[in-house]
Amino acid sequence: MTTVAVDRPPGSNLLLRAHKVTKAFGGLVAVKEVDLEIPRGSIISLIGPNGAGKTTFFNVIAGILDPTSGAVEFDGQQVVARPVRAWLEPITWVVPAVIVGVLGVLAYQASAVAGALIVLLAILSLIVMLLAAIVRPAWYRRFLLRVGVFKSARPNEMVRAGIGRTFQNIRLFANMTALENVQVGMHLKMTANAADALLSTRRARAEEKESVTRALNFLELVGLKGRGSFMAKNLPYGDQRRLEVARALASEPALVLLDEPTAGMNPKETREMTELISRLRHDLGLSFLLIEHDMKVVMGISDRITVLDHGERIAEGTPEEVRRNPRVIEAYLGKPPE
Amino acid sequence: MTAVSNPRVQSPWARLRSGARNHRSITILLGWVLVASVLPVLVLIPPLSTFQPQSLWIDGFSNAGVFILLAMGLNVVVGLAGLLDLGYAAFFAIGSYVYAFGDSPFTNVQIPFWPMLLVGAIIAATLGLLLGAPTLRLRGDYLAIVTLGFGEIVPAVFLNASSLTKGTNGIGGIYKPELFGFKFTLENPVPYYITMVAILAVTMVLLYRLQGSRLGRAWMAVREDELAAASSGINTITTKLLAFALGASTAGLAGVFATSKLTFVGPGQFGFQVSFTVLAMVVLGGMGNIWGVATGAFVIYTIQAVVLKELNQFFQALHVPILQSIDFVQYQYLLYGIALVAMMLLRPEGLFPSSRRRQELHATSDDVADVPPPTEALDA
Amino acid sequence: MTPDFRRIARPLGIGAVALLVEYLLLGTQQFANAMTLGAIYALIALGYTMVYGIVELINFAHGDVFMVGSFLAMWIMTTVFGLVGPVTNLLNLVGLLAIVMFATMLGMGLIGMFIERVAYRPLRHAPRLAPLITAIGVSFILQNIIAVAFGPSPVNFPQIVPADKFDLLGGKIAYLNLFIVILAVVLMIALQLFVGRTRLGRAMRSTAQDREAAELMGVDINQTIAITFFIAAALAGAGGMVQGLYAGSIKFDLGFYVGLKAFTAAVLGGIGNTTGAAIGGFIIAFVEVYATVLGYTQWSEVAVFTVLILVLVFRPSGLLGQQLGERT
Ligand SMILES: Nc1ncnc2c1ncn2[C@@H]1O[C@H](COP(=O)(O)OP(=O)(O)OP(=O)(O)O)[C@@H](O)[C@H]1O
Ligand SMILES: [Mg+2]
C-alpha cells in the first residue's frame, strides 16, 4: 500500500476517496472514471439501473478487482490502484537466493562447510520471501514499494484496514451455523494461532468462549436472536441477508459496504434494516456505502447519493437534488418523447 | 416462487455430535486405549486366528496405523480445507528418506528415532510450503495437477540421484528405534504397535483441537466460499498453505515411522498408487470427519492387505469354477476407482460421514442461497 | 496494433520464435523428433484446454483416454485387420491408416461422451472437489481395465508404416514423423475451422464465455459440453494411434506420464486457448528432447515439471491466456 501525499492529513473527515476509478472487462467498460467521497459517519448511496456498474465499483473498492485505472484511498492511504511492475515481485523472491546460492557454490571450493551453510542460507531466503509474499507483513509491503512494485490490497487486507462488506447474491458459508458465520467474521479480531489451538491454551479457550458471546450479540443486533444454531443455508432469505450484515459488522469495520441489503425483504424487514443502519451510524459512528434499488430506503437515509449509468457518474448530490435531476429521471425512465 | 426451505433447528445433542469443538481430549485418548487393547485380542477369536499368527496380526495393525496416519493428514487438506492433493505419497517418501539419511549406516549418521519423527515432519512441511506457495495463489485445481506431478517427481529424483540414494536398490539396514536402552526388534511387534497407537492418539487429539479452533473455522470457510472468506478478513492463501503443510508434516511423520519399521527404503514404495489409496481412504471414510477417515483407512487397509489375498486362497481351496482363477489383488485399484466414482455420485459424504459434511455435499447450488426473493420487493 | 491483428500475430510470432530456437539448438534430426513428439502432446493438450475452457474441470482421465485410444487402435489393427508388419503398398497403407484412425477417433469420442455423461454431468452443480475426485477415479478405472485386459507389461503396436527415411537438411527423417506432424496440423486446422466457423463451434465458444448467457440465448448446454468431450477424446484417440506407431509399444500407464506433460503444455500455452495448447505441446516436447540430447533422459520429467512450476509462478496465465491470477 502506498502512502501518497494527500491534501488532507490522515484522520481527516474523509474516510474513503475514489479517484477516477475505471474498470474494463475486455472491451466492456463497466465503470468509467467514477469519483466518490465518503466522509466519516455518513451514509452514501450508489444507485443506477441494472448493469450500471455499481457492484463492479464495489468490488474495486473491496480489493476484489484491480481497477483498469484510477485509485482508491482509504484513511489517507492509497489501497487500490492498477498494479505497477507486478512482474518484478516473483523475481525479487528468486534473485537473492540465486546470488547467495552462487556465492555458496563458489565458497564450497574453499570450504565445504561454509559453502553448504551459505547454500542453506540461500534456500532459507527463498522460503522467507515466498512466505512473506503470502502473509504480506508490513516490512514486505515497504520492501515492495522500495523496489517500485504496487499491488492493490487484498480483500482480507481491506477488512483489516476497516472495510466490511456484504454481497448482492448472498455468499454465506452455507454449511456452517449462523453463529459460526459471525465467528468467521470476527477472524481478525481474534488472535489464537495454530500453536494456541494445538496446545489448547487457556487464552485460546477463553477467547473462543468470548467469541461465542460476542457473536450472539451481533446476531441479536441484526434481529437473529435464537437463530445461532441454524445452518446458514436453512435460514429464510431475509435472515440470510441479515446474517451477512452481522458477519460484516463482526469485523468491526469503519466503513460498511452493503450491496442491496434489503433485496428480497418485505416492507417490515426493510424498515428494520433501515433503522439498523441509521442506528449504527448514530451509535457507533460507522459509515455506509449503500447500493439500493428501493428508492424509499435510499431517499430516507442517505446523506448523499451518487448515480451511475452505463458505468458513468451522471449525478451526485443530496437526495433532493438527485430526485429532481433530469438526467437521473431520464436514466431511470428513458428519454421523454420530444 | 416462495418456497423457502424450512428452517430446521438442530437439537443441542445433534450439535454435540457434529460440533468439533465439543470434544474432550481425554475421551479421544481413552477411545484409542480401548481400540488398541481390543484389536489384538479380537485376533484370538477362532476364524480370524486361523489365517495368521497373532504377532503377524499385530504387525499388520502397525502397518494399518501408518495408513490411518496418512489418511488423517490428507483429511486436513481435502476434507477440511477442500484442496485436492494428489501427490501425497511424495511427502511420505520425503519423511522416509529423511529417516534413512538421519539414522542409518548408509550415511553413517545416527540421530535417534524420536527426534527424527519431528525432523521428518518439519522437512516434509517445509517442502510442502515450497510447493504450495506458488500454487495456492491460483485456482484450486492447479494444486491437484501440481501435486500429481510432484508425487511423480519425488520418487523419480530419489531413483535418479543414485549417488545419494543408491537409486533403485534403495537404502537398507536402517536403524530401529530405541527407548531408554530398550531396543525395538523385528521379532517383537508390540513396541511398534504401542508407539503407533500413541502417535495416532496424540495426532487425533491435535487434529480435533485444530478443527474446532479459529484456524479450523477458517479452513471450513475457505472450503465453503473462498471469496467470502477473504472478505471476512481471512488470508486465504496462508490458511490453505497451513492446511497443506500440516498434511505434509503428518505424511512425513508416517514416513519416518514406516521406515524405522521396515528398515529399508526404495523409490518403488511411493508410486501414485499410494497417494490414490490414501485418497480413496479419505473419500470412503467421509471427508472432514476424523474418526470416519481413520475407520475408512483401517477398513481399506485390511481389505487390501488381508481380504483380497485370502479371497484368492479361499476360492482356490474350494475350487470355485470361475472365481478361483481370478487374481483379486490385480483388481484392487480398479475397485478403488469404481468406489471413488460411485461414492462421489451416490454417497459423497462417505461411509462414515460427519453430519456437517453430509449436508454440504448433498446440496446443489440451487438450494444453497438461491431462494427466490418475494416479488413485491422487486417492484418496490 | 488492432486487437484482431494481435490475436493472430502474437501466437504466430511466439510459435515461429520457439521453432527457430528449437531448430538451432537441436539440429535437423532431433528437431524432427521434437516436432513429432510435440504433435502428439499438442493433440492431447487440446483436449485438456477445450474441456477446461468449457466446464472449468481438469479432466485427469484425459491422459488415460489417450492411452485407451492407442490400445483401441492396436486392437483394431491386430484383431480386425490382422496386421503385424509394414504395409508396403502405399494405397493400402493410406486406406488402412484412414480407416483405423477414423474408427479410433469415433470410438474414443463416444467413450469420452460416455464418461462425461456418467461421471461428470451429474456433478455439474456439486462442490468443485467432487468432479475432480471422480475424474481421478475414472483415470484409475481406465488404467486398470486396460491392465487387466492386456496385461501390465508393454504391448507391441503393429508397425504398419515402413521405416523408410528421406534426407532433409543433413538429417535422415522417417516418413512416419512427417505423417504424424502433418496429421496433427491438419486436425488442428480442422478444429479451428470447426470452432470458428460452425454453429456448434459458436455454441462452444459462447458456452465457454458465459454459460448462463449462452443458455438464455438458446444454446443447448448439455449437447455442447458432450460435443466438446467427444472432440477432445477423438483428438486424444488420434494421438494414441500415432503414439503407438511412433513408439512401437504401448503400456497401460502411458496416459499418466504423457497426460501430465500434455497438461503442462496446456498451462504453458494458456489454459483455455487452443492455439496456446499447440504451441505449448511443441515447447514441452523440445524440453524433453533437449534433455535427452544433453544426456539427461531420466531427468526429462523433472525438467517438464520444473517448467510447470515456473510458469505457475511467473506467468500463471500462460503464453497466450487471459489473466487468471489471484484476483479473478
Ligand atoms: N467479471 C465480469 N466479466 C465481464 N463482465 C462483467 C463482469 N462483472 C460485471 N460485468 C459487466 O459489467 C456491467 C456492470 O455490472 P454490475 O454487476 O457492476 O452492475 P450493477 O450496477 O451491479 O447491476 P445490478 O443492479 O443488476 O446489480 C454489466 O454489463 C456486467 O455484465
Ligand atoms: Mg449489482
Image (cartoon, helix red, strand yellow):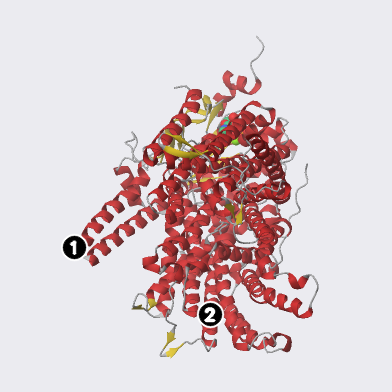
Q: Quadrant location of residue B352?
A: bottom right
Q: Quadrant location of residue B288?
A: bottom right
Question: Which of the numbered marks, if any, corresponds to residue B196?
Answer: 2
Regarding mark 2 in the picture, which secondary structure is present there? helix
Whole-percent x and y of residue A296? 64, 33
Q: Mark 1 lies on which chain?
A: A
Which residue does the numbered mark 1 point to in the structure image? A110
Residue drawn where x is 34% and y is 46% of the image:
A91
Residue drawn where x is 72% and y is 50% of the image:
C79
Identify residue type, mark 1. Ala
**Nearer the observer, A288 or C2:** C2
A150 left or right, relative to B57: left
Residue drawn where x is 40% and y is 54% of the image:
C296
Callout 1–callout 2 Cβ contact below 8 Å: no
Using the rendered image, report if marks 1 and 2 lie on a common chain. no
**Nearer the observer, B12 or C97:** C97
Q: In which quarter of the image is ligand 1?
A: top right
Residue B217 visible at all? yes
Regarding mark 1 in the picture, which secondary structure is present there? helix
**10 Å crowding of disc 2: few (<14), some (14-19), many (20+):** many
